[in-house]
Image (cartoon, rainbow, N blue to C red):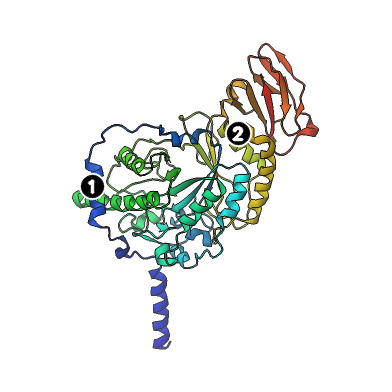
Amino acid sequence: MKHWAILFLLCLSLMAHAQWRIHPEDYDISQKDIARARQLIETPLAEPVVFPNPSAGAQWFPTAGLGLFMHWGIHSVEGVQPSWNMIKGFRYAGRNPHSRKTYYAMARKFKPKNYLPARYLKACKEAGFTYAVLTSRHHDGYALWPSKYGIGTKQYLNGRDLIREYVDACRKTGLRVGIYYSPRDWHYPGQMRDEEFVEKTRKNLFPITDSTQNEKDYVKFLGYVMAQLEELLTNYGKIDLLWLDGMGWRGVQEKNTEKIYAWIRSLQPHIVINDRWANLVDPDNPDGTSVSIGDFTTPFECTTPTYLPYKWWEYEDLWTSGGGWGYDKKGKFRSMGWFFRSLTAARSLGGNFLVNIGPDRNGNMHPNFYHMMDSLTTWMIYGKESVAGTQMTPGPELANVPLTSRGQDTLYAHILPNSKAQISIKTGRKPKEVLLLRTLKSLPFIYREGYLHFTVPKQQRTKMDDVTRIIL
């Protein structure tokens, strides 16, 4: 082979390698930001943080009902699992795992030219969604805004601010603004060892040879995280919700959760924050040692809710069946029956349902998304009153179907596609009327010894939630 050909191949190899290697200059954290992190650690709280947030501007959350979760980033280029796709042998890595080199190489192809978030957010608003949550940065470290530290749109998209476009679209369509941010950064120098990108060895404990230096490294990393959070919380006006996803540094027990939340509220007094700065219930970090605290809890990730976990809480799950949390290239959505089982499971226990749909490489939704939104919009014409702004009414204790309520005199019975038996509800009061909301026609019923019994005729059943309104 000619020498020029060998040199050419070598250059190509180096160029490919450069797409994922760490550039230390991107993480040259200023002494000012490091000092702020140190001050936060060393300064005691003046008073305990109150959870949930008592601010009047935060009280929308417990009755919000339905939110849209969107995992979007360089992983969307090929429709693979965000970040975890790089963990060799990990059960949730997906069908097409990537090495770090090939994963980060997708940054070159992530060029969302026709990003029109207002289009799909408008469809969500019409379908009854009240808030949205977009991944500003996942564990892979790629930021969707031009942050002064780390990698992201600053290096690859000439400083384009995709977060601003998203926030503006939320406000235009009337959705509350939620931002997901992972404090972890697998691209950050020293946060991840090579062994941690292999499932068999990623949990191996390695001794910390210099605990003093390790603690300094942690403070520097915290300074980096706080600097990025400050950008997200001060550059875009009011942010309604912050969805964190797991702080951690090897050899350091995370003890700053409450201080971080107090600091975040100093920037955004009315914000609602989840319980995943560092905690015990994070599925990605089951070995965490910090106490789970936040304005709302998230114990039911991809698991149907079965109990009341806290005053404010949220259930997250995937509406598409391919691509994990990322983009599903085939656009295969789980059924409307599944959607309503999930929504009513959350609302009957007073929680919100945050359902995930990953946008494509351009930041737009698969065409099938709009079909699902159309179906949901049609249902919301008559069914919205049964899930939005309603209160907790535990079904298993009172009925053989999920229940929600509004005030003292109105119950909603959610008759799902798999509900076949006679509906039985312990009301303790004789109803004035049982009404099928879709048709606004009364249903015959029997009331005996505190129990209400009725059925919905087979010819009036649908593949949706055949919700009934019960006036006591």
Could you tell whether 19 is left or right of 175 in the image?
left
Q: What number is the disc on residue 38? A: 1
Quadrant in the picture for residue 363:
bottom right
Could you tell whether 392 is left or right of 227 in the image?
right
Q: What number is the disc on residue 387? A: 2
Give how far across and how far down residue 362 sits, in percent. Answer: 55, 61
Dot 2 amino acid type: Val
Residue 72 visible, this orientation: no
Quadrant in the picture for residue 101:
bottom left
Q: Quadrant of the C terminus?
A: top right
Contact between marks 2 and 1 (CB within 8 A): the answer is no
Dot 1 amino acid type: Arg
Q: Is residue 7 above or below residue 83?
A: below
Could you tell whether 287 is left or right of 318 in the image?
left
Q: Nearer the viewer, residue 243 or 329?
A: 243
Query: Residue at 30% of width from left, 32% of height from top?
Result: 48
Query: Residue at 54% of width from left, 56% of height from top?
Result: 95
Give neighbour class at mark 2: few <14, some 14-19, many 20+ (Cα, 10 Å).
many
Q: CA distance from mark 2 to mark 1?
A: 45 Å
Give how far across and how far down residue 312 sits, in percent. Answer: 47, 32
* Element type at mark 2: loop
Query: Residue at 38% of width from left, 45% of height from top?
Result: 246
Give how far across and how far down residue 273 sits, in percent. Answer: 42, 40
Q: Name the residue at the top extreme.
A: 449
Q: Is residue 1 above or below residue 200?
A: below
- Sooner in the amino-acid sequence: mark 2 or mark 1: 1
Query: Residue at 71% of width from left, 18% of height from top?
Result: 432
Residue 376 visible, this orientation: yes
Give neighbour class at mark 1: few <14, some 14-19, many 20+ (Cα, 10 Å).
some
Give how far across and how far down residue 222 sits, in percent. Answer: 29, 49
Q: Quadrant of the N terminus?
A: bottom left
Q: What number is the disc on residue 397? A: none
